[in-house]
Amino acid sequence: MLSNSKALKLYRDYKSQIKTDLVKTNIVNSLKCLFSKTEQVIILMEDIIRTKNTYTAQILLRSLIEHFLIGFYVFLRVRIDKTDDVGDEYYDFYQNSEYLKQETYSIQIENIQNRLSEKIDATRLKQKFPHLNNLEQKDLESYHFEGNKFANLKNIGKFLIENGDFEPKLQPITTKLVDLIDLYNYLSSYVHGGPFAEHELLEMNKSEIEEFERKTIDWADVLSSISVNILFLSMTYEKPEIYSPLFSQTYKK
Protein backbone atom coordinates (compact mmCIF):
# COMPACT_ATOMS: atom_id res chain seq x y z
CA MET A 1 0.00 0.00 0.00
CA LEU A 2 1.10 3.55 -0.61
CA SER A 3 1.14 6.12 2.15
CA ASN A 4 -2.15 6.74 3.85
CA SER A 5 -1.99 10.46 3.00
CA LYS A 6 -2.14 9.60 -0.74
CA ALA A 7 -5.16 7.30 -0.34
CA LEU A 8 -7.01 9.72 1.93
CA LYS A 9 -6.41 12.69 -0.34
CA LEU A 10 -7.88 10.84 -3.32
CA TYR A 11 -10.79 9.61 -1.20
CA ARG A 12 -11.62 13.13 -0.05
CA ASP A 13 -11.25 14.51 -3.58
CA TYR A 14 -13.72 11.94 -4.96
CA LYS A 15 -15.97 11.42 -1.95
CA SER A 16 -18.89 13.43 -3.32
CA GLN A 17 -18.66 11.75 -6.71
CA ILE A 18 -18.63 8.29 -5.11
CA LYS A 19 -21.83 9.11 -3.23
CA THR A 20 -23.42 10.25 -6.50
CA ASP A 21 -22.17 7.31 -8.55
CA LEU A 22 -22.98 4.47 -6.17
CA VAL A 23 -26.75 5.11 -6.31
CA LYS A 24 -26.64 4.57 -10.09
CA THR A 25 -25.37 0.99 -9.77
CA ASN A 26 -27.13 -2.36 -9.33
CA ILE A 27 -25.52 -2.89 -5.92
CA VAL A 28 -26.63 0.29 -4.20
CA ASN A 29 -27.04 -1.07 -0.67
CA SER A 30 -23.75 -2.97 -0.74
CA LEU A 31 -21.82 0.08 -1.93
CA LYS A 32 -23.69 2.30 0.52
CA CYS A 33 -22.58 -0.02 3.33
CA LEU A 34 -19.01 -0.19 2.05
CA PHE A 35 -18.84 3.59 1.70
CA SER A 36 -20.15 4.00 5.26
CA LYS A 37 -17.58 1.53 6.61
CA THR A 38 -14.76 3.34 4.82
CA GLU A 39 -15.92 6.65 6.27
CA GLN A 40 -16.12 5.22 9.81
CA VAL A 41 -12.67 3.64 9.54
CA ILE A 42 -11.16 6.98 8.50
CA ILE A 43 -12.96 8.90 11.26
CA LEU A 44 -11.81 6.39 13.88
CA MET A 45 -8.25 6.52 12.54
CA GLU A 46 -8.26 10.31 12.96
CA ASP A 47 -9.66 9.96 16.48
CA ILE A 48 -6.93 7.46 17.38
CA ILE A 49 -4.26 9.90 16.22
CA ARG A 50 -5.83 12.76 18.17
CA THR A 51 -6.50 11.02 21.47
CA LYS A 52 -4.00 11.42 24.30
CA ASN A 53 -5.29 8.36 26.15
CA THR A 54 -3.70 4.99 25.36
CA TYR A 55 -6.65 2.99 26.72
CA THR A 56 -9.14 4.99 24.65
CA ALA A 57 -7.05 4.40 21.53
CA GLN A 58 -7.37 0.62 21.96
CA ILE A 59 -11.17 0.86 22.23
CA LEU A 60 -11.26 2.98 19.08
CA LEU A 61 -8.96 0.55 17.26
CA ARG A 62 -11.20 -2.41 18.06
CA SER A 63 -14.22 -0.56 16.69
CA LEU A 64 -12.20 0.42 13.62
CA ILE A 65 -11.26 -3.23 13.02
CA GLU A 66 -14.91 -4.25 13.27
CA HIS A 67 -15.99 -1.69 10.68
CA PHE A 68 -13.12 -2.75 8.44
CA LEU A 69 -13.90 -6.47 8.63
CA ILE A 70 -17.60 -5.93 7.91
CA GLY A 71 -16.68 -3.74 4.94
CA PHE A 72 -14.26 -6.34 3.60
CA TYR A 73 -16.91 -9.03 4.06
CA VAL A 74 -19.46 -6.97 2.11
CA PHE A 75 -16.92 -6.42 -0.68
CA LEU A 76 -16.11 -10.13 -1.04
CA ARG A 77 -19.76 -11.17 -0.88
CA VAL A 78 -20.55 -8.81 -3.75
CA ARG A 79 -17.64 -10.15 -5.80
CA ILE A 80 -18.68 -13.76 -5.16
CA ASP A 81 -22.48 -13.40 -5.35
CA LYS A 82 -22.50 -10.73 -8.07
CA THR A 83 -25.71 -9.34 -6.55
CA ASP A 84 -26.76 -6.76 -3.98
CA ASP A 85 -27.90 -9.49 -1.58
CA VAL A 86 -25.33 -8.72 1.12
CA GLY A 87 -26.29 -5.04 1.17
CA ASP A 88 -29.97 -5.96 1.40
CA GLU A 89 -29.19 -8.36 4.26
CA TYR A 90 -27.24 -5.67 6.09
CA TYR A 91 -29.95 -3.00 5.91
CA ASP A 92 -32.87 -5.41 6.34
CA PHE A 93 -32.05 -8.47 8.44
CA TYR A 94 -29.15 -7.03 10.44
CA GLN A 95 -30.90 -3.74 11.10
CA ASN A 96 -34.08 -5.50 12.22
CA SER A 97 -32.10 -7.99 14.30
CA GLU A 98 -30.38 -5.14 16.14
CA TYR A 99 -33.70 -3.42 16.78
CA LEU A 100 -35.40 -6.59 18.04
CA LYS A 101 -32.46 -7.41 20.32
CA GLN A 102 -32.71 -3.92 21.82
CA GLU A 103 -36.43 -4.31 22.44
CA THR A 104 -35.86 -7.77 23.92
CA TYR A 105 -33.25 -6.33 26.26
CA SER A 106 -35.61 -3.59 27.43
CA ILE A 107 -38.15 -6.28 28.44
CA GLN A 108 -35.39 -8.20 30.23
CA ILE A 109 -34.50 -5.09 32.23
CA GLU A 110 -38.15 -4.60 33.17
CA ASN A 111 -38.33 -8.23 34.28
CA ILE A 112 -35.27 -7.79 36.49
CA GLN A 113 -36.88 -4.75 38.09
CA ASN A 114 -40.14 -6.64 38.61
CA ARG A 115 -38.44 -9.90 39.64
CA LEU A 116 -40.04 -11.79 36.77
CA SER A 117 -38.75 -14.67 34.69
CA GLU A 118 -40.25 -15.37 31.29
CA LYS A 119 -39.43 -16.48 27.77
CA ILE A 120 -39.21 -13.50 25.43
CA ASP A 121 -40.36 -14.62 22.00
CA ALA A 122 -42.28 -13.02 19.14
CA THR A 123 -45.57 -13.25 21.04
CA ARG A 124 -44.12 -11.40 24.05
CA LEU A 125 -42.57 -8.73 21.84
CA LYS A 126 -45.93 -8.11 20.16
CA GLN A 127 -47.62 -7.76 23.55
CA LYS A 128 -45.12 -5.13 24.59
CA PHE A 129 -44.80 -3.37 21.24
CA PRO A 130 -48.09 -3.37 19.27
CA HIS A 131 -46.40 -2.01 16.15
CA LEU A 132 -44.76 -5.44 15.80
CA ASN A 133 -48.14 -7.12 15.37
CA ASN A 134 -47.08 -8.81 12.10
CA LEU A 135 -43.94 -10.35 13.60
CA GLU A 136 -43.92 -14.16 13.68
CA GLN A 137 -41.49 -16.38 15.55
CA LYS A 138 -39.97 -17.62 12.29
CA ASP A 139 -39.37 -13.99 11.29
CA LEU A 140 -37.61 -13.28 14.58
CA GLU A 141 -35.37 -16.32 14.16
CA SER A 142 -34.63 -15.44 10.54
CA TYR A 143 -33.65 -11.86 11.41
CA HIS A 144 -31.22 -13.05 14.08
CA PHE A 145 -29.78 -15.85 11.94
CA GLU A 146 -29.07 -13.55 9.01
CA GLY A 147 -28.04 -10.69 11.29
CA ASN A 148 -25.37 -12.85 12.89
CA LYS A 149 -23.56 -12.93 9.57
CA PHE A 150 -22.53 -9.38 10.46
CA ALA A 151 -22.71 -9.39 14.26
CA ASN A 152 -20.55 -12.48 14.76
CA LEU A 153 -16.99 -11.50 13.86
CA LYS A 154 -15.85 -15.13 14.13
CA ASN A 155 -18.13 -15.98 11.22
CA ILE A 156 -16.88 -13.00 9.24
CA GLY A 157 -13.26 -13.88 9.97
CA LYS A 158 -13.81 -17.47 8.85
CA PHE A 159 -15.48 -16.33 5.63
CA LEU A 160 -12.70 -13.85 4.82
CA ILE A 161 -9.91 -16.34 5.45
CA GLU A 162 -11.61 -19.06 3.41
CA ASN A 163 -12.47 -16.74 0.50
CA GLY A 164 -9.67 -14.19 0.63
CA ASP A 165 -8.01 -15.63 -2.48
CA PHE A 166 -11.12 -14.91 -4.56
CA GLU A 167 -9.85 -11.41 -5.34
CA PRO A 168 -6.16 -11.69 -6.44
CA LYS A 169 -5.71 -7.90 -6.41
CA LEU A 170 -6.15 -7.93 -2.63
CA GLN A 171 -3.76 -10.79 -1.87
CA PRO A 172 -1.43 -8.53 0.20
CA ILE A 173 -4.41 -7.65 2.37
CA THR A 174 -5.66 -11.18 2.96
CA THR A 175 -2.26 -12.22 4.32
CA LYS A 176 -2.87 -9.83 7.24
CA LEU A 177 -6.31 -11.19 8.13
CA VAL A 178 -5.23 -13.74 10.73
CA ASP A 179 -3.14 -11.15 12.56
CA LEU A 180 -5.99 -8.65 12.36
CA ILE A 181 -8.61 -11.04 13.74
CA ASP A 182 -6.20 -12.04 16.50
CA LEU A 183 -5.71 -8.36 17.36
CA TYR A 184 -9.48 -7.86 17.46
CA ASN A 185 -9.72 -10.66 20.01
CA TYR A 186 -6.75 -9.28 22.00
CA LEU A 187 -8.43 -5.87 22.33
CA SER A 188 -11.62 -7.34 23.79
CA SER A 189 -10.52 -6.63 27.35
CA TYR A 190 -10.22 -2.91 26.61
CA VAL A 191 -13.79 -2.71 25.30
CA HIS A 192 -15.32 -4.78 28.09
CA GLY A 193 -13.40 -3.27 31.00
CA GLY A 194 -11.48 -6.44 31.75
CA PRO A 195 -8.51 -6.90 34.11
CA PHE A 196 -6.09 -7.86 31.33
CA ALA A 197 -6.18 -4.38 29.78
CA GLU A 198 -5.91 -2.75 33.18
CA HIS A 199 -2.87 -4.78 34.18
CA GLU A 200 -1.20 -4.51 30.78
CA LEU A 201 -1.07 -0.72 30.79
CA LEU A 202 -0.10 -0.51 34.46
CA GLU A 203 2.88 -2.77 33.88
CA MET A 204 4.23 -0.87 30.86
CA ASN A 205 7.00 1.68 31.21
CA LYS A 206 7.06 4.92 29.22
CA SER A 207 8.99 3.55 26.22
CA GLU A 208 6.75 0.48 26.04
CA ILE A 209 3.62 2.65 26.06
CA GLU A 210 5.06 4.82 23.28
CA GLU A 211 5.76 1.72 21.16
CA PHE A 212 2.28 0.39 21.93
CA GLU A 213 0.76 3.68 20.78
CA ARG A 214 2.88 3.70 17.62
CA LYS A 215 1.67 0.22 16.64
CA THR A 216 -1.92 1.27 17.30
CA ILE A 217 -1.57 4.24 14.94
CA ASP A 218 0.18 2.08 12.35
CA TRP A 219 -2.71 -0.40 12.30
CA ALA A 220 -5.26 2.41 12.02
CA ASP A 221 -3.25 4.02 9.22
CA VAL A 222 -2.90 0.79 7.23
CA LEU A 223 -6.55 -0.23 7.60
CA SER A 224 -7.82 3.18 6.52
CA SER A 225 -5.65 2.95 3.38
CA ILE A 226 -6.90 -0.56 2.65
CA SER A 227 -10.51 0.55 3.15
CA VAL A 228 -10.05 3.21 0.48
CA ASN A 229 -8.40 0.62 -1.81
CA ILE A 230 -11.37 -1.72 -1.40
CA LEU A 231 -13.90 1.04 -2.03
CA PHE A 232 -12.08 2.22 -5.18
CA LEU A 233 -11.81 -1.39 -6.39
CA SER A 234 -15.54 -1.92 -5.80
CA MET A 235 -16.34 1.21 -7.78
CA THR A 236 -13.91 0.09 -10.50
CA TYR A 237 -16.14 -2.87 -11.28
CA GLU A 238 -19.06 -0.45 -11.70
CA LYS A 239 -17.38 2.55 -13.36
CA PRO A 240 -13.90 1.49 -14.50
CA GLU A 241 -13.21 4.60 -16.54
CA ILE A 242 -13.24 6.73 -13.37
CA TYR A 243 -12.15 4.47 -10.54
CA SER A 244 -9.62 2.11 -12.12
CA PRO A 245 -6.98 4.89 -12.28
CA LEU A 246 -7.74 5.80 -8.65
CA PHE A 247 -7.32 2.22 -7.51
CA SER A 248 -4.02 1.99 -9.39
CA GLN A 249 -2.76 5.08 -7.59
CA THR A 250 -3.58 3.77 -4.11
CA TYR A 251 -2.46 0.20 -4.54
CA LYS A 252 0.75 -1.66 -5.18
CA LYS A 253 1.71 -5.28 -4.63
Image: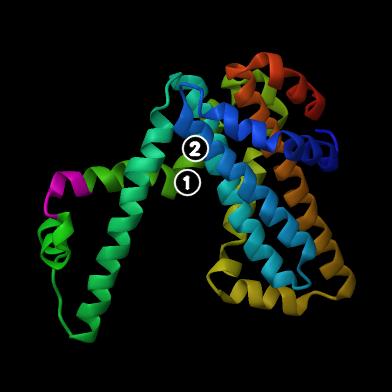
Q: Quadrant of the C terminus?
A: top right
The spot of residue 224 in percent (x, y) is: 71, 44
Secondary structure type for disc 1: helix
Residue 28, relative to residue 82: is it above or below? below
Tell whether label 1 touches label 2 (CB within 8 Å): yes
Comparing 15 with 246, the one in front is 15
Magenta stretch holds residue 138: yes
- Residue in the picture at 15% in, 76% down: 117
Whether 190 is among the magenta residues is no
Residue 68: x %, y % from top left: 60, 44
Q: Which mark is residue 138?
A: none
Q: CA distance from mark 2 to mark 1?
A: 6 Å
SS state under label 2 = helix
Residue sitting nearer the eye, 231 or 178: 231
The amino acid sitting under disc 2 is Lys
Residue at image mark 1: 154
Q: Decide if residue 102 is on the left or right side of residue 168.
A: left
- Give me the residue at 60% from left, 25% from top: 234
Residue range corresponding to the magenta coloring: 133-140
Q: Residues within 10 Å of mark 1 (few under 14, many from 20)?
A: some
Q: Is residue 186 above or below residue 238?
A: below
Q: Return the x and y of residue 161 as percentages of the image width and height.
A: 55, 33
Is the N terminus in the top left, top right, bottom left or bottom right quadrant? top right
Task: Give the residue drawn at x 10%, y 59%.
Answer: 123
- Which residue type carries mark 1? Lys
Residue extending furthest toward the bottom: 114
- The answer to which of 250 and 20 lies nearer the viewer is 20
Does 48 sit left or right of 233 as displayed? right
User: Could you tell whether 47 is left or right of 5 in the image?
Assistant: left
Residue placed under numbered mark 2 in the picture: 158
